[in-house]
């Protein structure tokens, strides 16, 4: 029995796919060991969203080879897909597996191990004659991957409380700073019946909350002619045993009156929406190729607040995009205050080779990016505190997830439907248990006290 150590980098989609790969390997009889232990095989599910992500991917590949020079080191995923030329000459890498081939990892690995035993084997034959990395930009195949079997999820023993469900892959947007369309290909939607079957199965196992994830979930269904996200949500809302449905990152364009009105009628939809912004300045948005204006974006936010009571609206913001002047940044800062988000993920622009933005003039100095990032992080903290403050004294439903010691006391920690973190002081294990009660005040800056009814 060969041992395999796995390490995941990047997004929730990568995490979902890593879990499936582990299950496939376990079914073949491989022994899974921690990544910091010596193993026969190391598999790194790589990320390529920024140059720093590429660097981290290479670092983990080299760390694995250093830990056991005789091990087979596998680079899987996005860096293997877009950085193939560099990975092919990297002495730390033995095998590359690109996107849309992760479902075949067990078979690919067995074929590689068999090839390695042959006398004419060429060391570091990294792509098995080209079969492990396809032209991702010219496929319409959705790579069907799902966690299955009795051990795939364990809600009964409360080792899971939330399930991420991948519903699509790929992106057609081509934002000027983003390499992901080249790493993941065009939009490919998962079959509705497969999604519903997976969710129904995990709901039977005790799952109460799912998060729909993908590379660009707003585009779900467009490869079949039109958006099908609202129809999918309507059907998921009927799954027995399921209590909450959260949506991953959404694009402003999907927030039309029919869509927002439609989801507001679904009782299981959580009033927690991540609407990607990236900049609060129209000129910067134009250079980013984001295809909406700040006024249009604000209309979407106001539409959500019209149909939901105090929805949690979160976003992403990039600071220091090429050409961003101080005036443009101030415009962004003012817009963020006007939109009044619950949380903001602030990113300093990272130059990514292979994108249009990488060759743009007027690249912003790192020191300027840092100063602007710190300003927005402070603003984000203020807005988050104000949003949480508005729930003090109000009733809330909390799904508990884990125990945590705070200031010498044991609390059960969970989240409200708006994704506000709440804490109940008790030593009783409440993981995957839902309670109704009242939020009474701040326990910590990001945690509210909760008292059950």
Image (cartoon, grey):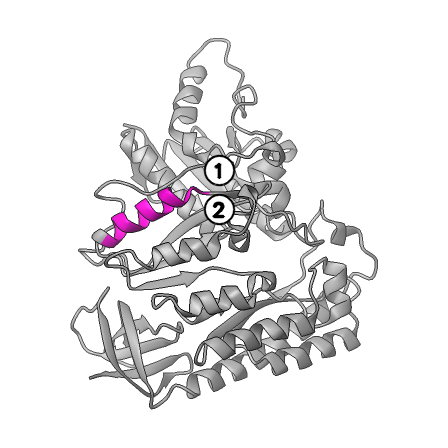
Residue 57 vs 365, above or below: the answer is above
Residue indicated by mark 1: 142
Mark 2 is surrounded, within 10 Å at the Cα level, by few (under 14), some (14 to 19) or many (20 or more) other residues, namely many
Residue located at (40% from left, 69% from top): 265
Quarter holding the C terminus is: bottom left
Q: Is residue 61 visible?
A: yes
Q: Which residues lie in the magenta part? A: 190-203
Front residue of 33/68: it is 33
Instruction: Say what secondary structure mark 1 lies in.
Output: loop
Marks 1 and 2, how far apart at CA: 7 Å
Residue indicated by mark 2: 168
Please tell me which of labels 1 and 2 falls first in the chain: 1
Residue 399 vs 125, above or below: the answer is below
Q: Is residue 336 magenta?
A: no
- Name the residue at the top extreme: 119
Q: Is residue 193 magenta?
A: yes
Front residue of 434/427: it is 434
- Name the residue at the front extreme: 258
Instruction: Say what secondary structure mark 2 lies in.
Output: strand
Residue 280 on image: x %, y %: 68, 72
Front residue of 56/396: it is 396
Residue 274 on image: x %, y %: 51, 66
Chief secondary structure of the magenta portion: helix
Residue 27 vs 190, above or below: the answer is above
The reply to whether discs 1 and 2 touch (Cβ–Cβ < 8 Å) is yes
Residue located at (23% from left, 44% from top): 151
Q: In the displayed structure, does residue 276 sit left or right of residue 142?
A: right
């Amino acid at each position: 029995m060969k041992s395999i150590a796995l390490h995941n980098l990047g997004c929730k989609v990568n995490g979902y796919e890593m879990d499936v790969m582990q299950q496939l390997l376990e079914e073949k009889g491989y022994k899974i060991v921690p990544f910091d232990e010596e193993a026969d095989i190391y598999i790194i599910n790589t990320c390529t969203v920024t140059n720093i992500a590429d660097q981290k991917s290479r670092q983990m590949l080299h760390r694995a080879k250093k830990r056991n020079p005789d091990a087979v080191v596998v680079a899987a995923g996005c860096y293997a897909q877009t950085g193939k030329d560099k990975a092919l000459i990297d002495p730390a890498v033995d095998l590359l597996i690109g996107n849309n081939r992760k479902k075949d990892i067990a078979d690919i690995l067995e074929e590689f191990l068999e090839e390695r035993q042959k006398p004419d084997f060429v060391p570091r034959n990294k792509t098995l004659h080209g079969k492990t990395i396809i032209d991702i930009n010219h496929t319409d195949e959705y790579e069907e991957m799902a966690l299955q079997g009795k051990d795939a999820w364990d809600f009964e023993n409360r080792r899971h409380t939330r399930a991420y469900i991948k519903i699509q892959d790929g992106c057609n947007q081509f934002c000027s700073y983003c390499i992901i369309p080249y790493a993941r290909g065009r939009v490919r939607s998962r079959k509705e019946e497969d999604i519903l079957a997976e969710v129904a199965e995990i709901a039977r196992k005790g799952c109460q909350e799912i998060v729909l994830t993908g590379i660009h979930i707003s585009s779900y269904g467009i490869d079949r002619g039109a958006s099908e996200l609202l129809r999918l949500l309507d059907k998921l809302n009927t799954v027995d045993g399921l209590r909450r449905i959260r949506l991953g990152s959404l694009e402003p364009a999907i927030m039309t009156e029919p869509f927002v009105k439609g989801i507001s009628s679904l009782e299981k939809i959580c009033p927690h929406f991540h609407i990607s912004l990236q900049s609060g300045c129209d000129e910067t948005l134009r250079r980013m190729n984001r295809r909406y204006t700040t006024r249009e974006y604000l209309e979407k936010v106001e539409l959500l607040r019209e149909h939901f009571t105090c929805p949690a609206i979160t976003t992403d913001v990039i600071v220091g995009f090429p050409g961003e002047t101080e005036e443009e940044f101030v415009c962004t800062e003012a817009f963020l205050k006007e939109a009044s988000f619950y949380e903001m993920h602030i990113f300093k622009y990272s130059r990514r080779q292979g994108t249009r933005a990488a060759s743009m003039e007027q690249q912003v100095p790192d020191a300027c990016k840092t100063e602007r990032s710190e300003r927005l992080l402070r603003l984000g903290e203020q807005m988050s505190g104000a949003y949480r403050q508005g729930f003090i004294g109000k009733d809330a439903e909390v799904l508990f997830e884990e125990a945590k010691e705070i200031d010498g006391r044991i609390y059960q920690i969970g989240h409200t439907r708006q994704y506000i973190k709440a804490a109940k002081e008790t030593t009783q294990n409440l993981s995957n248990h839902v309670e109704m009660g009242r939020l009474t005040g701040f326990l910590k800056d990001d945690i509210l006290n909760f008292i059950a009814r």
